[in-house]
Amino acid sequence: MTTQVQPRDMTINANGINLHYLDWGNENAPPLVLLHGLRGHAHSWDDVSAALCQDYHVLAVDQRGRGDTDWAPGGDYSGAAFVADILGFADALKLDQFTLIGHSMGGRNSMAFAARHPDRLTQLVIVDIGPTVDPAGGQRITRELQEVPEEFDSLEVVFEYMNRQNRFSSERVMRRRLQYATKQFANGKIGWRYDLAIRDQRRNGTAAPAEDLWPLIPNITCPTLVVRGKETDLLTPEGARQMVDTLPNGSVVEVERAGHMVFEDNPEDFIAAVKGWLLG
């Protein structure tokens, strides 16, 4: 999947921090904002962004503590802080109404934003996350975050380590994910680009408690698509169905050959499903 379109690296101050984002051009098209997951970054969406930027003004955001965005003051990675960032970002760019797509942590942030600011969204896509998750999947992610080494001898060693956890993503996608998720330290080692306070909070139990989003779901009034990876261990079929039953205007689609990282595991089918729904 290749494209000649290249995004512009942009930064805007919103909610008191510098938010980095990728602007894929087409400024006269309807705006579409992309929010990555816990360990993701704006480039996680590159295949999706390239496929949608002919029809939308695509803006892929590095959320606080990730990529090239500022780390959170005081280690504030609460849901309320993320929602305030989305609102600040939209206000700073004068996005009166826009489409929002969020994966995992970004999906939770998207749900909370959509419920509190329903007038700002035209469409919402929630990717492989719900108000509650399968405990096995949640424990897996926490365990991976807790156990991952802080430093590696080379990017190739990072790839070998992380690829052992990968079931579906292509080598191309995995290498891109890790290229933008890591950086070189002064000692020559390769380490993680995200704020390690995020990992430490998971290790010592000081992470902000997750808000119960179920009471908010009925407040999401825009058309909403729930996307579930057929092989995911995070969002159960029952959880996805409950979301659709609770949403005022919800539907669900499953993507074959995909786990939790749906749009990286099977980008072709994910793009086909989401683009068909958005433009249908």
Image (spheres, rainbow, N blue to C red):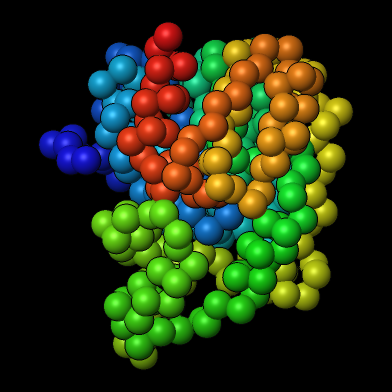
Q: In which quarter of the image is the N terminus?
A: top left
Which residue: 72% across, 63% down? 139
- State the image coordinates of residue 112 (x, y, percent, origin top left): 71, 32
Q: In this view, does 209 lie above or below 273?
A: below
**Figure check: 39 above or below 15:** below
**Residue 224 left/right relative to 212:** left
Task: Report the residue that reaches farthest toward the bottom.
Answer: 187
Label tally: 0
Residue 218 position by quadrant: top right
Left or right of 264, for residue 231: right
Q: Residue at x 38, y 33 (%)?
A: 269
Q: Can residue 256 be seen in this view?
A: yes
Query: Which residue is depicted at the point 79% across and 49% down?
Result: 210
Quadrant the C terminus occupies: top left
The structure residue drawn at horizontal position 74% and vertical position 35%, both measured from the top left corner, is 239
Q: Which residue lies furthest to the top in this view?
A: 280
Q: Residue 114, how many percent across, how many down?
A: 67, 24
The image shows residue 188, relative to residue 236, as above or below, that is below
Question: Which residue occupies the foreground of this view, 159 or 5?
Answer: 159
Instruction: Determine whether 191 is above or below 89 in the image.
Output: below
* Residue 8: quadrant of the picture: top left
The image position of residue 221, as x and y in percent, is 69, 13
Residue 14 visible in the shown view: no
Q: Give the percent coordinates (x, y) of residue 188.
A: 32, 87
- The answer to whether 229 appears left or right of 10 in the picture is right
